[in-house]
Amino acid sequence: MTGACLLTFTLTGTPATAATGSDALADTQASVARLHIGEGDTTRSCSGALVDRQWVLTAAACFADNPALSTQVTAGKPALKTTATIGRSSLAGTGGHVAEVAELVPSPSRDLVMARLATPTTGIATLTPAASPAGQGDTLTAIGFGRTKTEWVPGTAHTASMKVTASSDTEVTLAGATANDALCKGDTGAPLLQESEEGVALVGIATRSRQGGCLAETETRTDAIATRTDDMADWIATTAGRSWALLMTATDFNGDKKADLLAIDAADDFLYAQPGDGKGKFGKRVKVNEGRWTGMRLLAVTDFTGDGKADILAAHTNGNLYLYPGNGKNGITGSSVVGSGWGGIRLIAAADFNGDKKGDLGAVHTNGNLFFYPGNGKNFASGAVSSTGWTNMRMLSAGDFTGDDKADIYAVHNSGDLYLYAGKGNGTFHTARKTGAGWQNMRLLSEADFNADQKSDLIAIHTNGSIHAYPGNDKGGFDAPIVTPAPAI
């Protein structure tokens, strides 16, 4: 892969050698992502620009099978596991934000792709596309995690000063401003930034380079190509806007016997309830409480306290598990910490799995094990391994899908296949049964009886932002969905 580098320049500090930009430009380095793509022999690295708290803009070539032949990328989950590290001054450090890339949205016409993070960043500034293109003779700063003159795999971001030599409708041609400025392997996707009185703006994404002066290269020319981003602001904003919901769950939250949608809004971090109409559509939302739900990464709902009202359970990035008792009228009555050390849990589903009329949790650990946590109305007993082999599951929901009064689990595999795990009534499950396919474009999932027929249904949010409500048939299957268009507010 190819990309941007050179002068040592930490994410938040001052340049170690000659400055290639003003001190203000150093602050933007926290918004540069290092993408680790694949595992083992397939591993490769790229750079990228954080353009929304949950989206990184980079070169499509980073994810192409053979970028020398084609930069076309299939939309959806990356073929290779991809991890993004953002806002970290050193890759060996512990600050910033680390998240798996959950979805790719390629540009239909350029070597660009938007990569959606599984969990949104907090407190990290985003880069904004420039309002006009860079002109010939302009000097831009490239920031990336690529190779340097002396290091194969640098632990910090580096900068290169690049001069625009020509431009077209879609690309800008660049050359190193000095003999020590170049774009190297690992910097594909690096942002090209321009500083003005209005601030720092994103004018391009690095895509190709001759790599002159880079470690182990004999080439001396520093010519490079970047894809223009100044005229892609609408596409970037539209793509990022599809993630209007950071997290979602569903239940009858207002006490009218119709399932409602609960979602943390991506724009303001507030939790909203959208009332269901009993037919699969959802109406105007209302704010659940005045506190922001910043940092929550998992959400589930059921009657945990046993008072007949739906309660919310949320896992925070700090590892704590929080219980928010519902008041039955679209609100909550405070909160309490009911668990700690949940940093290794990546999926949760709530239901009364053991039939004692108290809400329990099923939780998938990063090691691939499914744990059963019995609830006692106030908190949860220690978890016990219920089953193994859940590594490739990416969404989870629980309900009585088979009509036997025992809670089951539905799981969506990375492949998009839908699997039913019929519950035994004791927190364990029968062997999985594949019941569907084509769910790779669904990004959030929840069980709820939205049509009040006493059968568990599924509600999912599509990658295009629309809400899909699937009526259950009590036999583990579903009828055609009812769709509420995005943004569903």
Image: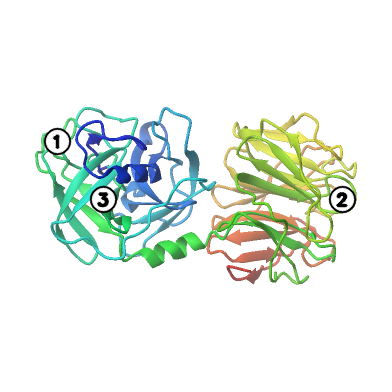
Query: Which three-letter amino acid code belongs to the residue tagged 1?
Result: Gly
Q: Residue at x 19, y 31 (%)?
A: 149
Earlier in the chain: of badge 1 and badge 3, it is: 3
Cα–Cα gap, marks 1 and 3: 17 Å
Looking at this view, name the residue that lies furthest to the front: 197
Earlier in the chain: of badge 2 and badge 1, it is: 1
Residue in front for this viewpoint, 417 or 89: 89
Image vertical order of residue 211 relative to residue 131, above or below: above
Query: Which three-letter amino acid code belongs to the residue tagged 2?
Result: Asp
What residue is disc 3 on? Answer: 207
Q: Mark 2: which secondary structure?
A: loop
Q: Residue at x 75, y 72 (%)?
A: 279
Residue in front for this viewpoint, 375 or 401: 375
Foreground tag (2 vs 1)? 1
Cα–Cα gap, marks 2 and 3: 56 Å
Specify whether residue 73 is in view: no
Is 387 on the left-hand or right-hand side of 64? Answer: right
What residue is disc 1 on? Answer: 213
Task: Tell me where residue 339 sits by quadrant.
Answer: top right
Q: Mark 1: which secondary structure?
A: loop
What residue is disc 2 on? Answer: 405
Instruction: Please report contact status of discs 1 and 3: CB closer than 8 Å, yes or no.
Output: no
In the image, residue 443 lies at what x, y percent?
58, 55
Is 167 on the left-hand or right-hand side of 46? Answer: left
Cα–Cα gap, marks 2 and 1: 68 Å
Query: Which three-letter amino acid code belongs to the residue tagged 3?
Result: Thr
In the image, residue 99 lies at what x, y percent?
50, 41
